């Protein structure tokens, strides 16, 4: 079943859940794309997969989503 942005936001309701979800997505797609013999630089830059109707690259996940989620997660844990 295809997820929507709204359903993801509802399900991923805290930083820990977001961190786990996006880390698992990153790791799974990294393995899949490497097995499909994509050129190594391309798997990071090209938007090769869709999540909740949006296209993503591994760079999108790492730099736009994971780093901000992990940063927010660390701040929460330190307070």
Image (cartoon, grey):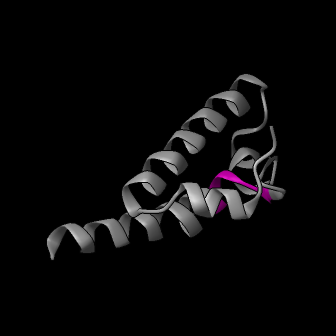
Q: Which residues are magenta?
A: 55-60
Q: Would residue 41 be found to the left or right of residue 19 on screen?
A: right
Does the magenta segment cover residue 58?
Answer: yes
Out of 55 and 7, give the one closest to the viewer: 7
In the rendered image, residue 67, in percent from the top left (x then y), is placed at: 45, 65
Q: Above or below — where is 65 with respect to 34?
A: below
| Residue depicted at 15% across the width and 77% down the height | 79
Furthest residue toward left: 79
Out of 18 and 38, give the one closest to the viewer: 18
| Residue depicted at 43% across the width and 52% down the height | 17
Q: Quadrant of residue 59?
A: bottom right
Q: How many numbered marks does the figure carry?
A: 0
Quadrant of the image containing the N terminus:
top right
Q: Above or below — where is 58 with respect to 5?
A: above
Q: Above or below — where is 45 with respect to 67?
A: above
In the rendered image, residue 58, in percent from the top left (x then y), is placed at: 65, 51
In the rendered image, residue 70, in percent from the top left (x then y), is placed at: 38, 63
Does the magenta segment cover residue 35?
Answer: no
Q: Would residue 32 be found to the left or right of residue 17 on screen?
A: right
């Amino acid at each position: 079943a295809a997820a929507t942005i709204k359903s993801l936001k509802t399900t991923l309701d805290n930083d820990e859940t977001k961190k786990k979800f996006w880390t698992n997505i990153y790791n799974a797609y990294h393995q899949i794309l490497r097995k499909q013999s994509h050129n190594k630089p391309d798997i990071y830059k090209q938007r090769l997969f869709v999540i909740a109707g949006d296209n993503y690259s591994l760079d999108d996940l790492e730099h736009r989503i994971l780093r901000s989620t992990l940063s927010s997660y660390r701040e929460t844990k330190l307070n």
